[in-house]
Image: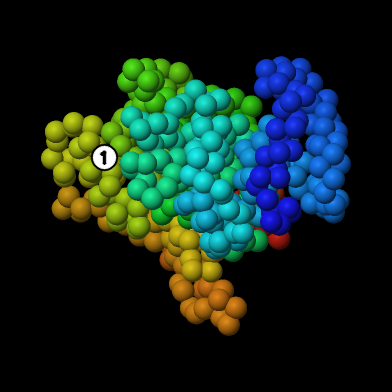
Amino acid sequence: MDILNSEEFYKSIRAYIFNFISPSEILREKEENPQKLKEKLRNLSITAIQESKKIIPIVHQEAIINRLINEVFGFGIIQPLLDDDSITEIMINGPKEVYVERNGKIELTDLKFDSYDQILQIIDRIVSPLGRRIDESSPIVDARLPDGSRINAVIPPISVKSPTLTVRKFKEAILDYESLINLGTLSKEMSTLIDSLVKARVNILISGGTGSGKTTLLNVCSTSIPKDERIITIEDSIELKLHQPHVVSLEARPPNIEGKGEVTIRNIVINSLRMRPDRIIVGEVRGPEAFDMLQAMNTGHDGSLSTIHANSPKDVISRLISMVFMAGVDMPVAVLREMIFSAIEVIIQTSRFRDGSRKITSISELTSLENGEIIMHDIYNFNFENIDQNGKVNGKYVYNGISERIEKKISSFFKGESKEVEEAPNKKKIDSILKILEDKEADPSENNIDS
């Protein structure tokens, strides 16, 4: 038997330690003095390894000690994956199938579990402190870790072959416009436009598929909101990290074990209107709350932001109509389209490409309503050119002009906010914005985004 890869050997070390320190003592010391407990676990582990009379290299001793500490303080054998900043998603499909997403691409890891029960133990360790449960009567759970990472767990009988766990890791570093430009997500001129749209209180929906960068872009857009505004954020699971001083973060709550106590996104959106918001940011609109969000946008809450799952800007309109019907609203589709047109002004479409890169593929404005149909125009769109020998997607952003509807809103804002314009360092504006600000430009050579 290979001692270095032996689960039995690790369990023997673990049993040795728990003979000297009880679970209740571990819980107490974790609260009172975690560093002291870590040192105690390390010293006991070294003693146990020495008494085993096995010759084990220092590097493998450290691996055993770290695994034990991770079991007590972290999430067992997946803790190294959680600590790896290059990993954005962890996908456990079964004991021998642990995948991660790194640089936008999925790869199989060498990590393996011994049994289904070991996966269940980690799932239970994650969800129990959050006041959630998972069992045969409730086999699906959505939750978030203390650092903001999102987890989804599914166990049999829903997950047929094995308990599965998916962790979407939260990135602590908040990106800004410049970071997205460097990543190729958008161009400098596009960032200037988006920055101006947010400041001018244009209602924006960010659309895209799973993992396309919607929430990241929403976070970046929020940096353009003035610091003197009261912002209400509404989410299923808290992901937004706003740096403004006046932010109220609200989170939906699932029902308890008795099926009571549920607080839906729709409940919170309705309540938020009584909280005197300057801006309402809904992390993702996916159900009946769409109707209340549209009503809010139509009743003076300009500058609202949200994300939505859709493959194109046109699909966004269809999805919003479907969601409004989910709210039990009985009104003609033509009236709903008029309501959507009045509320939503810009849709930003994001996509994840084959090379793992995430890009804005279009910035579309809702320009007019003709014969009951919403007419849209792409201010910017990404033109795909080719895939190079390294598998990288190449293309360019094309500017197609801006309509009078958006131009008027930007114009009225900046004409009334001359002080902000004078202080803004982003002095290079695209055609329409340059026309509005030409008399206020101090140094057109500067084009960094103030985020």
* Whether residue 239 is situated above or below residue 406 in the rendered picture: above
Which quarter of the rendered picture does the N terminus lie within? Answer: bottom right
Q: In screen coordinates, is 392 left or right of 291?
A: right
> Which color scheme does this rendered protein use?
rainbow
Q: Secondary structure at mark 1?
A: helix
Which residue is at the far bottom? 389
**Which one is in front, 25 or 373?**
25
Q: In screen coordinates, is 178 left or right of 382?
A: right
Q: In screen coordinates, is 391 left or right of 56?
A: left
Residue under label 1, please give it: 323
Q: Position of residue 113 (x, y in %)?
A: 56, 49
**Which one is in front, 142 or 380?**
142
Question: Which residue is painted at 42% across and 25% down in the image?
Answer: 253
Where, by quadrant of the figure, is residue 65 drawn?
Answer: top right
Q: Position of residue 246 (x, y in %)?
A: 59, 25
Q: In screen coordinates, is 384 left or right of 258?
A: right
Residue 407 in view of the camera: no
